[in-house]
Image: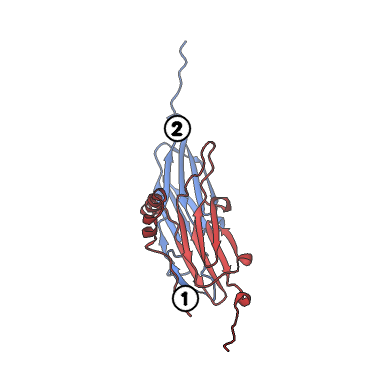
Chain colours: A red, B blue
Amino acid sequence: MSTIMNIDPWGFLDDLLGVPNRTFQAMRARAAGRFPPVNVFLDDNAVLIDLQLPGKTAKDVSLTLEPQAVVIADKPAVEEGKEGAQPAWSRRLDLPFRVNADKANAKFTNGILRIELPKADKEGVKHIAIQ
Amino acid sequence: MNAEEKFVVPSTQFVENPEGYELKVSLPGIGKEDAELHVEGKTLVLKAHSKYQNPAGFRQVAAEFEHESYAMSADLPEMADISTMSAKLENGLLVVTIKKRPETQPKKIEIL
């Protein structure tokens, strides 16, 4: 089984090719060490992602689940009269398998966010008989 | 006690305002019961033992932090009034507030 996970150390290249504003925010975040560090754990049924986010709570972080990736980003505080503030950081982790979004859960404990993403059931898999 | 317990110096922020000082210490993974804070003379000493464990039965595929224990000490400013010190640890962030000694505060003198 291929279990190598792409934690995207060269993601800034994507940033460079993307929206300039975001680019420099992400790069600044990296340079300033504001990027939350992650630990990733795998077994055959799930992936667990831990992030160090001291002082943060559920309202400060946004999680977006794609079929085979998760995007974790800071949720900028909404200031009156200002809209569309860019997140100070965001991190996209590619996953080695499709996950079951309905069973995903995330919980903060003492400033560490643990995201648990169970592997999707095989229901979606279609076996095709070879004629 | 784990003889090989590794301590790291946590990242901190120290802010002075007109009334006093605020020290913020990042202690991810540390709960209230895991941290000890005391003052020795004019030195603030913090030790926090992490109980955090990697999940059992999983293999680690990315490791950007360890479940560290933290230790630090800081000399408090001369103007700090240690008797007013209070500390709060919430969501892995320790906030210590200390007022300045009243006699160090500027006094407003009424002009008659």
**For this rendering, which residue is in front, B39 or B16?**
B16
The C terminus of chain A appears in which quarter of the rendering? Answer: bottom right
Q: Secondary structure at mark 2?
A: loop
Q: Residue at x 44, y 29 (%)?
A: B105
Circle 1 chain: A
Q: Is residue A52 something one can see in this rendering?
A: yes
Q: Are marks 1 and 2 on the same chain?
A: no
Amino acid of disc 2: Pro
- A19 left or right of B54 in image: left
Q: Which mark is residue B18?
A: 2
Q: CA distance from mark 1 to mark 2?
A: 55 Å
Reading the image, the residue beneath label 1 is A3
Up the image or down, A60 lies above or below B59; here it is: above
Residue B50 visible in the displayed image: no
Looking at the image, residue B16 lies above or below residue A53: above
- Foreground label between 1 and 2: 1
Residue B81, percent across and down? 47, 38
Residue at (59%, 77%) from the top-left corner?
A: A125
Question: Which three-letter amino acid code belongs to the residue tagged 1?
Answer: Thr
In the image, residue A50 sits, relative to residue B41, either above or below, namely below
Residue at the far top: name it.
Answer: B112
Question: Residue A23: x and y, percent?
Answer: 39, 52
Picture coordinates of residue A48 (x, y %)?
53, 68
Position above or below: A31 against B7: above
Frontmost residue, A102 versus B36: A102
Q: Viewer-proximal residue, B72 or B62? A: B62
